[in-house]
Amino acid sequence: MRRQQAVMSAMTNLLFPLLQEAACAYVLIVTAIYWVSEAVPLGAAALVPAFLYPLFGVLRSSEVAAEYFKNTTLLLMGVICVAAAVEKWNLHKRIALRMVMMAGAKPGMLLLCFMCCTTLLSMWLSNTSTTAMVMPIVEAVLQELVSAEEEQVMAAPDNSTSEETQPISTVCLNMLLLSKRQHEPQEQLLVLPPDPRNLKLNSKYRSQHDQMVCKCLSLSISYAATIGGLTTIIGTSTSLIFLEHFNNQYPSAEVVNFGTWFLFSFPISLIMLVVSWFWMHWLFLGCNFKETCSLSKKKKTKREELSERRIQEEYEKLGEISYPEMVTGFFFILMTLLWFTREPGFVPGWDSFFEKKGYRTDATVSVFLGFLLFLIPAKRPCFGKKDKGEKRENTMEMEPIITWKDFQKTMPWEIVILVGGGYALASGSKSSGLSTWIGQQMLSLSSLPPWAVTLLACILVSVVTEFVSNPATITIFLPILCSLSETLHINPLYTLIPVTMCISFAVMLPVGNPPNAIVFSYGHCQIKDMVKAGLGVNVIGLVVVTVAINTWGINLFHLDTFPVWAKVSNITQQA
């Protein structure tokens, strides 16, 4: 009898880990299927581990719940507060129009200007929001470029038909949509394409050159938004998911923060921006850079002068810079400086002034400044003497820079839940031993050099992310790549950082990401145009990221050694 009990106990001890791994793999597969098929919203699919893990005995319900709200969530909330203020007071529109005025109406310089402007905004706002903000301005400029010379040719009054006025109405509607952007929730973001009644008219460009200019400028906005999102750790949801997963997987690794990520990614973005500009110019506008990029006023055509005048008029409508814009801009710059100087690495940061180390993160800065935006009034304070009635009226009308409704409209709660679901899956994979098992199955790759393993992983995710959403792709691949790196004794950052960046290169299809869909909805480009141009941008990004991780990335993150924090994590999982 005792022997039978001992045998049963031994079998249970052997089978229980296998059952745990199988249950965790089942939950992972079910969640991945929902993410890939999008049968339910991504946020709803991310809740699957919250009820399946406790049912299968993989994790306690309280343990799963703790994974859905992390430090990154606070970081995102603080950033969204500043982003909401930028959108509410039209600071983004002022920046965009000002940069366009500096560039002029030459196609080459206009292309470079819009790409720089979009990249700058996308560093701090979501790629989708940035594209939605800039595209109406681009559409207005394009309509002016196409219709300006027609207005000169049509001298007879009877030739001034609705064909001339309809593009202007499209511009007005798009500008109206841009001004109303602050009143719409992030989840219900709708970007108004050209009027369907004008699609035939808009498809009949004056010349092949006009058509190519429209294609080039439209597609460049989506690509520039992607490039800008790579620059900062808060630029895309994929980098936020990577950051929290990395900190959760390797808690003793104080390597990746806002400053180190920016030092690594800023040269990548700069190189990609310049090379992509050359690629788009060559593909759509040809190689005559001298004509399309000239800043000489003598070489401007009548249509270019008219377009510049219209842009100047739009900028003048904004009036002088307002007090809320100044406050928002100051907070924007202050937040960036505090992020950079917290732990610069080469010199002691302001965090070293506190007695207890490690208590303050980038989230501390963003939440603090975001909270202040709810306190600071939107009207400039006046310290002069006023009548009692006037003072009471001003007190009643006083409101802060942003309200809770402004924050709610901009906050992407679906992304928050999606990120939490990814953390829950990673935690279950680690506790059940599934991640260790997956890593052991990949020992066959040990014969390849580290750079080849990273390159294969980057190519794989670049293909997958064209058909699967970026957050879902990185959530699926992160646990696998962590286990692979630990098994092959490669610094995990050597694979995780380039893969995180390459996942953002879903630029060849309208379904690849929301910015692509927004640009495609304006009707200037076809799918074959997106595939041709996007393939070049994808290759450019893959090459630049691969070169970066094998040059300055090695010195910045010490990628040539297998770090102690990765060894500790590996030992913990095996135990």
Image (cartoon, rainbow, N blue to C red):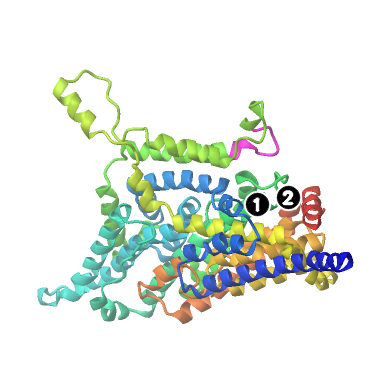
Give the mark, 2 or 1, whose residue is nearer the N terminus.
1
**550, above or below 88, in the image:** below
Residue 451 position within the rendered picture, expressed as x and y whole percent measured from the top left: 77, 65
Q: Residue at the spot x=41%, y=75% of the render?
A: 212
Q: How many numbered marks are there?
A: 2
Q: Is residue 159 left or right of residue 72?
A: left
Q: Kindly identify the amino acid type of the residue bearing the numbered disc 2.
A: Phe
Quarter of the image for the C terminus: give it: bottom right
Dot in front, 2 or 1: 2
The answer to which quarter of the image holds residue 527 is: bottom left
Residue 524 position within the rendered picture, expressed as x and y whole percent measured from the top left: 37, 75
Residue 366 position within the rendered picture, expressed as x and y whole percent measured from the top left: 50, 40
Q: Nearer the viewer, residue 448 or 14?
A: 14
CB-based contact (under 8 Å), mark 2 and mark 1: yes
How crowded is the residue under tag 2: few (<14 C-alpha within 10 Å), some, or many (20+)? some
**130, above or below 291, in the image:** above
**414, above or below 321, in the image:** below
Q: Residue at the spot x=46%, y=65% of the render?
A: 222
**Boundaries of the magenta span:** 340-349
Label 2 to label 1, Cα distance in Å?
9 Å
The residue to which callout 2 is attached is 557
| Residue 291 visible in the displayed image | no
In the image, farthest residue toward the right: 3
The residue to which callout 1 is attached is 264
* Secondary structure mostly seen in the magenta stretch: loop
Q: Is residue 438 left or right of residue 290?
A: right
Q: Is residue 278 left or right of residue 515?
A: right
Q: Kindly identify the amino acid type of the residue bearing the numbered disc 1.
A: Phe
Label 2 SS? helix
How crowded is the residue under tag 1: few (<14 C-alpha within 10 Å), some, or many (20+)? many
